[in-house]
Amino acid sequence: MAGTALLGRLTWQLAELVDVIAETPRATTLVFAVPDWPGHRAGQHVDVRLTAEDGYQTQRSYSISSAPDGTRIALTVVHVQDGEVSPYLTGELRSGDQIELRGPVGGYFVWEPEHGGPLLLVGGGSGLAPLMAMIRLRAAVGSDAETRLLVSSRSWEDILYRTELERLAGHGLTVVHTLTASRPSGWTGYARRVDADMLAEVGPGPAARPQVFVCGPTPFVEAVAEALVTLGHEPRRIKTERFGPTGD
Amino acid sequence: MDETMLDGNAVAGMLRDVFAVETTTTVATCGGCGEPTPMGETHVYRGAGFVLRCPRCENALVTLVRGDTRMWIGFPGIRTLQVAIDAS
């Protein structure tokens, strides 16, 4: 189960949309039932493949945001204006519709409860999705691993899973938000992009030797990883996942 | 920095079309600078195909080109791959 055993080649399988959750004005969570789902680890992703009537195919990778839960997986999709795949997934797909997916994929950007803490999780935008799988798994198994979650969002309305995070906070989990584009009136939290000073304040510092997971768009990940190394975190304890279009 | 750069996690599914092992935790030692890197940490650039580069020296480690019915995989810059196997 450590992701080291021979796994066999991955094949595409059919997944049925069973639930749709409007997260923010721009993001939707799609819950799929996958009959032969082998289970996943927190942080893994799937590839989704769409085929047009003329045979044209395109695919995208999406992190799984749900904790392991039988044969159901949740993917949070941000609606990209003029995108090829996300408008279809967030606007056209209806409960009962089927898509093809392949997974779970990845074993590098993964947290297991037995890895323990302390943890520093830093997510930019929908980069929060795989970190949310870790947070949900941590809660599901009753782990008290010390965890600091720093979430960078454009605005208050754009914060993913906000009410669930409020509910899960405590029991060793601290959630800190920074809003980069606009703030509600009276906002007293961070109001800038993640930088070294912010990371130092959120902690845990390098002396605590936290495992660090950073996920977001490439410029976000590069900036955060560089700041972490500047603060003295060991590069090998910093795991990163960058996202962007990978469709073929 | 190239904002379109991805990392080895992004091509993991494609590699699993071919390889029976998890590639993101497979450690590739760069033939250029000698740095060992989990494939998930490689820098990935997309053009007509994908190029996986060493995050330390940017040497091209792996190239991937996909056609409809076959995939071309080149290993121009890998000295060794450390692949986890079952102890049994």
Image (spheres, coloured by chain):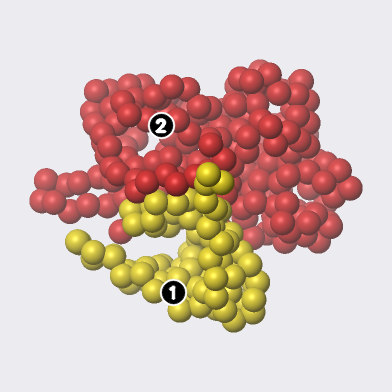
Chain colours: A red, B yellow
Q: Chain of mark 2?
A: A
Q: Residues within 10 Å of mark 1 (few under 14, many from 20)?
A: few
Residue B53 image point, x, y percent = 53, 71
Question: What is the residue that sits farthest to the front in this orientation?
Answer: B88
Question: What is the residue that sits farthest to the left in this orientation?
Answer: A54
Asked whether residue B53 is in view, the answer is: yes
Find residue A144 and name its label: none
Name the foreground residue: A113 vs A218: A113
Toward which corner of the image does residue A178 lie, by quadrant?
A: top right
Residue A54 image point, x, y percent = 10, 51
Question: Is B63 displayed left or right of A117 in the figure?
Answer: left
Name the foreground residue: A30 vs A71: A71
Count of labels in the image: 2
Q: Chain of mark 1?
A: B
Both labels 2 and 1 in a single chain: no
Question: Is A50 displayed left or right of A238 in the figure?
Answer: left
Find residue A38 and name its label: 2
- Residue pictured at 58% horizontal, 74% vertical: B30
Tag 1's secondary structure? Answer: loop
Toward which corner of the image does residue A135 lie, by quadrant?
A: top right
Q: How far apart in space, not on screen, are marks 2 and 1 (Cα)?
A: 31 Å
- Residue pictured at 27% horizontal, 52% vertical: A58
Task: Look at label 1 and name its amino acid.
Answer: Phe
Question: What is the residue that sits farthest to the right in this orientation?
Answer: A207
Residue B29 image point, x, y percent = 59, 70
Task: Look at label 2 and name its amino acid.
Answer: Pro
- Residue pictured at 45% horizontal, 71% vertical: B62
**Residue where numbered disc 1 is placed:** B75
Residue A189 image point, x, y percent = 76, 36
